[in-house]
Image (cartoon, rainbow, N blue to C red):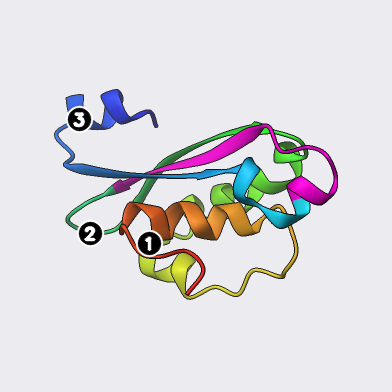
Amino acid sequence: MAGNTAKTQGFEIKVGISRASCNGKAIASGESAGFVKVILCSKTGELLGAHMLGSEVTEMINGYIVGRQLEATDLDIAHTIFPHPTLSEMMHSAVLSAWKEPLDS
């Protein structure tokens, strides 16, 4: 779901973005263009939607699809271990970004 759609449906949202240019695997592979963006319900943490652009995103989007099916929240995603170095770390970083948390602490 896009942010505008979520707002139209009455959700208060928070948005997180993780840029490929900040991801070690993307930089090392020369594929640092792109991003992962999440739209979360600010009240419940529900994952409302995600947008991905860049290298190998078709290999990652299924993680958010499963999350939606299982009604995952931002806490569920934040507490999931994402291997390092991987592009999928951007999925984790996007959620932390929505919280305005430091990403590399």
Q: Is residue 20 left or right of residue 30?
A: left
Residue 44 is tagged as 2
In the figure, is residue 21 to the left or right of 77? Answer: right
Q: Mark 3 Cα within 10 Å, few/some/many (few <14, many 20+)?
A: few
Name which of mark 2 and mark 3 comes first in the sequence: 3
Name the residue carrying label 3: 7
Q: Residue at x 71, y 52 (%)?
A: 87
Numbered mark located on residue 61 in the image: none
The span from disc 1 to disc 3 (Cα, nearest Å) is 18 Å
Residue 48 lies, with reference to residue 42, above or below; the image says above
Q: Measured along the vertical axis of the image, is residue 22 above or below residue 103?
A: above
Residue type at tag 2: Thr
* Element assignment for label 2: loop
Residue 14: which quarter of the image?
top left
- Which sits earlier in the primary sequence, circle 2 or circle 1? 2
Residue 23 percent across, percent down from the top left: 66, 52
Q: Which mark is residue 74?
A: 1
Q: Which residue: 56% across, 47% down?
A: 65
Q: Callout 2: 10 Å neighbours few (<14), some, many (20+)?
A: few
- Mark 1 neighbour density, 10 Å: few (under 14) some (14–19) many (20 or more): many
Report the magenta residues as a range: 26-40
Instruction: Residue at 21% x, 52% y: name it.
Output: 42
